[in-house]
Amino acid sequence: MQNKKILAIDMDEVVADAVPRFVEWYERDTGIFLTPQEIHGGEAWDAVRPEHRELASKYVYKKGFFRDLPVMKDSQEVIMELMTHYEVFFASAAMPFKYSLEEKHDWLEEHFSFVPNTHWVLCGAKHIINADFLIDDRSKNFERFRGTGILYDSPHNQKETRYHRVQNWQEIREYFL
Amino acid sequence: MQNKKILAIDMDEVVADAVPRFVEWYERDTGIFLTPQEIHGGEAWDAVRPEHRELASKYVYKKGFFRDLPVMKDSQEVIMELMTHYEVFFASAAMPFKYSLEEKHDWLEEHFSFVPNTHWVLCGAKHIINADFLIDDRSKNFERFRGTGILYDSPHNQKETRYHRVQNWQEIREYFL
């Protein structure tokens, strides 16, 4: 029986950076390079030209989108440190994206194998997660969550003020340790 | 905001019958047909001849094992009825079996599309599930679970006496409705 508090961590835009993949595919398909300034303040798929919106909105459903995403800076080291004080789970809303299931499994195996796969959760709605804390970039995931939501800063969540916001993994380290 | 109690339902040996697939593959590979009597009281992979144990223990890790499993009798009708009174999630310990992820997704899409995919959870350890009830054939999943465990009768759990046991989906219907 463990008595550590349970910390659940979202994947996309928290430990895995999906924006570069989006920018890469969009440039591949249209020749247009989206700058961080263009994406800031909204969803990446809203920053595209109107005539490309349908194309861009389908990227996350395609094979390969979630494979080989860059790891968020410092996340591995900080999570390894957090695990001595917390029971850490990954909790990713993967279910609408069928091909992401195996890709997220492989990605965690590659980059976070020190978190046992008993502690990887691929889900949809996150109020099913029984954790004391949830670090997530989408505040909708906190609405029925039983614990404390920690908002990971992301271009699309700039207007959200209801939750404690962290800008990076060093700030998470400070908050929890 | 929903106020229904949350009911989490395991997949294998609760809504999906994996034993026929095991028996089928074992007969295909060895020519030996395992009877229900031989499996009763233990795990299917323990009922095989000692020289086949390694072979049989690998079946669940192979592609195709979890696809096209038969649906447990009455489970669809009863779950549909339960959904008017409970918020229903599926919660399956799929993570050790990489290929099962997509196969379980497709299986649910085929047989249980009336449960939205926001309510499908593929996980490992089940104490991460924030539900009021969990119907499962493995009592180890109840040990740190915060709600009430309901044990679905299965060949391997015959000696377990600590939890309320149900034999079939009609008994689940009676318990919950």
Image: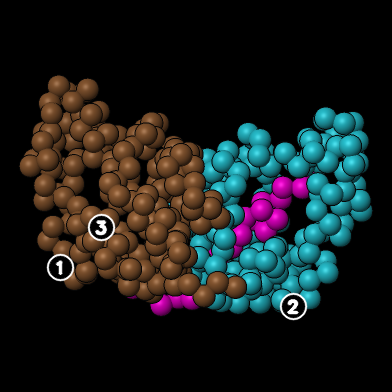
Chain colours: A brown, B cyan
User: Label 3 belongs to which residue?
Assistant: A170
How would you classify the magenta stretch by its main secondary structure?
loop
Residue B8: in magenta span: yes
Res. A139 visible in picture: no
Secondary structure beneath dot 3 equals helix
Which mark, by number, is residue A161? 1
Disc 3 residue type (three-letter): Gln
What is the quadrant of the C terminus of chain A in the image? bottom left
Q: Pinpoint residue A13: horizontal percent, then vertical percent.
A: 28, 49
Taking B105 as reference, is A144 above or below it?
below
Q: Earlier in the sequence, mark 3 or mark 1?
A: 1
What is the spatial separation of the Cα atoms under label 3 and label 1, in whole angstroms?
20 Å
Which residue is more in the foreground, B107 or B56? Answer: B56
User: Label 2 belongs to which residue?
Assistant: B162
Disc 2 residue type (three-letter): Arg
Report the span colored magenta.
B1-20
